[in-house]
Amino acid sequence: MTLSVREHVADDSRSDILFVAAECFMERGYNATSIDDVARRLGATKGRIYHYFPSKADLFAGVFRFGMDRIFAAVEPYRNMPGPAAERWKKLAFIHTVRMMKSKTLAKVVWEGVEMHLRGATTPQQRIELDGLIRYRNGYSDIFRETIAQAREEGDFHFADLGITVQAMFMALNSPMFWYVPRPGETDEDIHNIANQIVAFAHRGLGGKEET
Amino acid sequence: MTLSVREHVADDSRSDILFVAAECFMERGYNATSIDDVARRLGATKGRIYHYFPSKADLFAGVFRFGMDRIFAAVEPYRNMPGPAAERWKKLAFIHTVRMMKSKTLAKVVWEGVEMHLRGATTPQQRIELDGLIRYRNGYSDIFRETIAQAREEGDFHFADLGITVQAMFMALNSPMFWYVPRPGETDEDIHNIANQIVAFAHRGLGGKEET
DNA sequence: TTGACAACATACCCGGTAGTATGTTCACCA
DNA sequence: TGGTGAACATACTACCGGGTATGTTGTCAA
């Protein structure tokens, strides 16, 4: 099926809003970002945004979902990779960490979404939407949890409590989101280098053996 | 010198405000917390708060500084502990992690303060105040940085880049701040157990040898 | 070609919030 | 014992920001 001109324009317009909104939410946070801020940066007005999103919370949820879709898609090809779980974890962790830097904008929005959920903000109506997204996001972290648990069973990882260790590991992998700032003229290799060091730290933290 | 009744009342009143404000800022974040919220929970009105703090930003800065003072004080006795740096790090890391749980309220406020600084919020006037607090906080993380660097020189820790590794480690130690929730009837032992696992993860991550 | 509708822009409303101006009470001191 | 100032409370203002109601313009289908 082919789309009409109108439908193309609308689809592009919507995703443009998502991108710009993601930037604003990341830079100033949810509360400090006004709809007018987003509109201004779009070179448009409120009307355009409210045409596609019924409320500010829905706009935020849209960015949240978009970000989750992206990171899920990035990880998907390696989810059921054959071979030892420890090797699979290494692949997943690397992809994840690189995403924290390359898609820092979306990553921070997702992060704030989780925090908002923990705080119990927004109305009960929008809470349902957020709850669904949180489950979505938990499904993502479960991938790591299960992989790590399996690797421990296979004798490649060694640690005590699974829940606590997963949290510590995830925060280590997520850390670039908070301090990484892209430098002009930076190559993929630079980013990969950083990611490798983060992954190496987490790998040792999980009780994995040094690579030969 | 002895203080008059008035001075006692004033001092207590001020610190009461700081505690309650810390709770509010933690639960809802800076922007979502109104001065009236804090006043309501105090069983008072705006007037009382504005009598001690010239603005909302100053109130926040007050909580920030108070939180930093506390954590600095907790760590101070072990700062210059004799013996190998790796052992000193273990002590410091443990204290720090326990604080992340026991003083989660203050810890989260400090965390948001750092994020606010990175975003460059507030007026230039209040930015100066915040800058000072950030340097204060950097002085704290430098303690860990130097200890780790020394432990590496002493051959107890093994990792590649110091800056990256310090960030990953710090996030791992800070992680309880985000997911830990005090359970009713929880003992110090429970908290220490969690902290020990976090520290163990970070310790392995830094390339430390398993304890015998 | 016309009417319906999408895709916005404009103009407006209103609740909430930081900050202020002005009481009011009471301790302490001369 | 009266005056002064600290420690608040009360009442008010100004503004910002989410949301809405109402245009306006172009597209497409019949």
Image: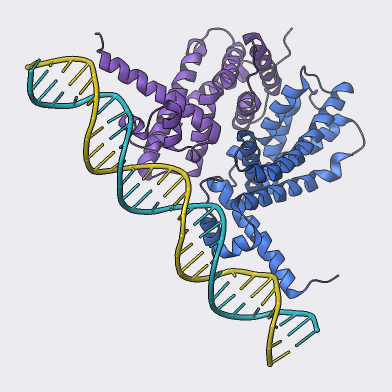
Chain colours: A blue, B purple, C yellow, D cyan
Residue B170, above or below A102? above
Outermost residue to the right: A82
- Quick one: B200 or B52, which is closer to the camera? B52
**Camera-nearest residue between B5 and B80:** B5
Query: Which corner quadrant holds the C terminus of chain B?
Result: top right
Q: Residue at x 54, y 29 (%)?
A: B108
Q: Look at the picture and state if A64 lies above or below B106.
A: below
Q: From where the camera sits, is residue A206 visible?
A: no
Quarter occupied by residue B50: top left
Q: Is residue A22 left or right of residue A207?
A: left
State the image coordinates of residue A169 (x, y, percent, origin top left): 71, 28
Q: Quadrant of residue D2?
A: top left
Q: From the top left corner, tell me how far across and down residue A36 is, in percent.
A: 51, 58
The picture quadrant where one finds residue B89 is: top right
Q: The N terminus of chain B is located in which quarter?
A: top left
- Total numbered circles: 0
Q: Residue at x 60, y 30 (%)?
A: B167
Q: Position of residue B92 (x, y in %)?
A: 57, 15
Image side of residue B101 versus residue A167, left or right: left
Q: Is residue B137 left or right of residue A176?
A: left
Residue A202: where, in percent of width, then height? 72, 28
- Res B107 visible: yes
Query: In terms of depth relative to the viewer, which is nearer, B205 or B97?
Result: B97
